[in-house]
Amino acid sequence: MTDLSPSTQVPDDEPAATPVATPSASVTTPSASHDKTGAAGGKRFMRQRRKATDEGVALGEVILEVTDLKKYFPMHTSGLVHRAADPVRAVDGISFSVRKGETLGLVGESGCGKSTAGRTMLQLLPPTGGTIRYQGKDITNVQGKELRRLRTEMQMVFQDPYGSLNPRQTVGTIIAAPFRIQGITPEGGIKAEVQSLMKRVGLNPEHYNRFPHEFSGGQRQRIGIARAVALRPKLIVCDEPVSALDVSIQAQVVNLLEDLQDEFELTYVFVAHDLAVVRHISDRVAVMYLGKIMEMGSRQDLYENPLHPYTQALLSAVPIPDPRRENKRERILLTGDLPSPINPPSGCVFHTRCPRFREELSESERTRCTTEAPVIQVENGHQVACHFAGPPKVEVF
Amino acid sequence: MSRWASADPASSGALLSVRDLKVTFPTEDGLVKAVDGLTFDLRAGETIGIVGESGSGKSVTSQAIMGLHRGTRAMVEGQIVFDGRDLIKIVDEDLRRMRGRDIAMIFQDPLSALHPYYTVGNQIVEAYRVHNDVTKAAARTHVIEMLDRVGIPNPQKRVDQYPHEFSGGMRQRAMIAMALVNSPRLIIADEPTTALDVTVQAQILNLLVDLQKEFGSAIIIITHDLGVVAELADSIMVMFAGKAVEGGEAEEIFYEAMHPYTWGLLQSMPRIDSEKKERLVPIAGNPPSLINPPPGCAFHPRCAFRDDARLGCSSVIPEFDISTEHPARCLIPEGERRAISQAKTKTRTA
């Protein structure tokens, strides 16, 4: 294990990363018809993608690089005079990179800062500190025209398919919005393009003039996805895209996201609390707690060899739809509640609820947890922020 | 007679007997048949899980048992026999006496189910004193014990706090304390952990299991999460479009499912303990309209196994034979379904 300072803790950052999957330059111009990168290109990309991830080899070049990102929300004292108080540290110094074509899962419980991280990455929220580099270019705090230009390449799919669609606009207007805003007229006109998008995401193009309330939850999420891919972006942040949906519909949307990724060569940051869905869709996964990354690694590393006590407790808590297995499982239960992100605990932020801290450590070891913030350790791209990282005492599944 | 229905609800020995329950809501567009002929028994101390997608009628069923449709435009027909009395027919006054004392409910969203203007303690004290002739001080002592029992730290202080001062998990514990304060014989838990994080969910489910052992209550747990029922339920009823489509022991539903919709549910869920990265198998289509349900089997437009020519899936309404222990509402011959089920279980649990 090597200790790395926060500024250099970017994961599998081998400089020799071969640009495996950059088939054609035509994707960079959003107005270009997607037919050029249609089925054949998509399939080739898909094979490369699957092969690359199966072998655990890095994919294409780093598309997004986040270094020591911080997002604090200011707080004020109550009463007559509103003085500034301690801020909410929603995201408190996270670093990671995303490679072209991969899916990075961002998991954690509510309040861990995963959604804020996703939004800050896209400049929907101005970061308090740290840098965000997109394709090598620093995009932290870009504004105006430059930001608008960036939006053609980075998009978002929101959690709530009810709240994220304007109820007074028709589906056609909603999906066409990115074209209008960017002043882009696709080949064949906006309407034809929108209808082909609707068809692509599994909606009936004849429903172009219907309103969101006429669609079910799953169909609405498809509308949101069609809007997000309209400009052929390169990166999409999916913020809990399936958690509001029924299980039977959830699988449809997950499959759609996977198909679009292969077809349009998309890179996803997939923010979710459902660890099973994240295991299914992600190539790499980062686990967040109180604004910090606790553990990050490939899907296999994280689910088959979790080293951080928090990851272990999280995985152990998920019920398995298999009563015979479920009855044999021993749970790692966390006690207590999430501490306040205004006053995070000293040292390791997880120590107040950590089962290992409580049960396995000596007094002197505990002192280390309560006073010294763990530095991220890396081994083969598997990062852990724990002084006493190691396999769990009981099987997590 | 099977677990699903005894001959005579009054003398069956079951704690709760639901017979041909129908709940319809009149709307501008027509009658919504939210629950369309539901029958089941629940014995004392047992747990039944009701699963199904949104709109399948599972929450409406629980609301009907609690009598929450009274005074609304909803029409409730059939029988809900609890402890020998039909809850649909009894007068409001009697129902009010039973609610909270004999039957209690745990709602999905504890923030909207608790009153924001009253302290948590006051609300639970009220729930206790409505049914018990005790002094405020005695009730308060009992409530503090209850809060302690459901794992709320520092209950002496917490009892005087307001719901907004509680975290989500703590609120749900407070709701459970309120539901259990009168040791009810039946607890209806409607998606009790859906709004909670997994680590908190694990704590709450553990608590429910422990408390059930201690208080001996029967539980109806309503959820869309098959993992939750796998952990809690003795028997499971799967609902689709207001009707039960399959019922059985928990193990039967998970390992010997006999309805295409149940297969679909089991298959479409990604599993956390599976390293296989295969495509998910979704159930095609969208939930059916409850005003104009599809003719024949309501599931046929989404069913991958429908065979109109041979079985008439789009015209014949399949039966739900509650005289058997493991009924399934499907026209496909049982032998064929058993073979499909075995193959599916094999691939899933491999």
Image: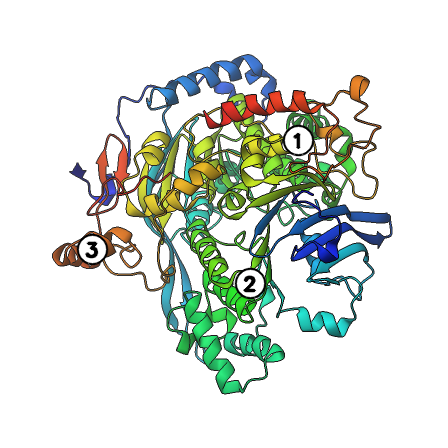
Crowdedness near tag 3: few (<14), some (14–19) or many (≥20) residues, C-alpha within 10 Å: many
CA distance for labels 2 and 1: 34 Å
The residue tagged 3 is: A369
Q: A256 or A152: which is nearer to us?
A: A256
The residue tagged 2 is: B110
The numbered mark 1 sits on a residue in which chain?
B
Q: Position of residue B233 (x, y in %)?
A: 54, 47
| Three-letter code for the amino acid on which mark 3 is drawn | Cys
Which is nearer the N-term, disc 2 or disc 1? 2
The residue tagged 1 is: B259
CA distance for labels 2 and 3: 34 Å
Crowdedness near tag 2: few (<14), some (14–19) or many (≥20) residues, C-alpha within 10 Å: many
| Three-letter code for the amino acid on which mark 2 is drawn | Pro
Q: A165 or B329: which is nearer to us?
A: B329
Which residue occupies 44% across, 58% down? B210
Q: Can you see residue B106?
A: no
Please tell me whether mark 2 or mark 1 is closer to you in this view: 1
The numbered mark 3 sits on a residue in which chain?
A
Please tell me whether mark 3 or mark 1 is closer to you in this view: 1
| Three-letter code for the amino acid on which mark 1 is drawn | His
Viewport quadrant of the N terminus of chain B: top right
The picture quadrant where one finds residue A179 is: top right
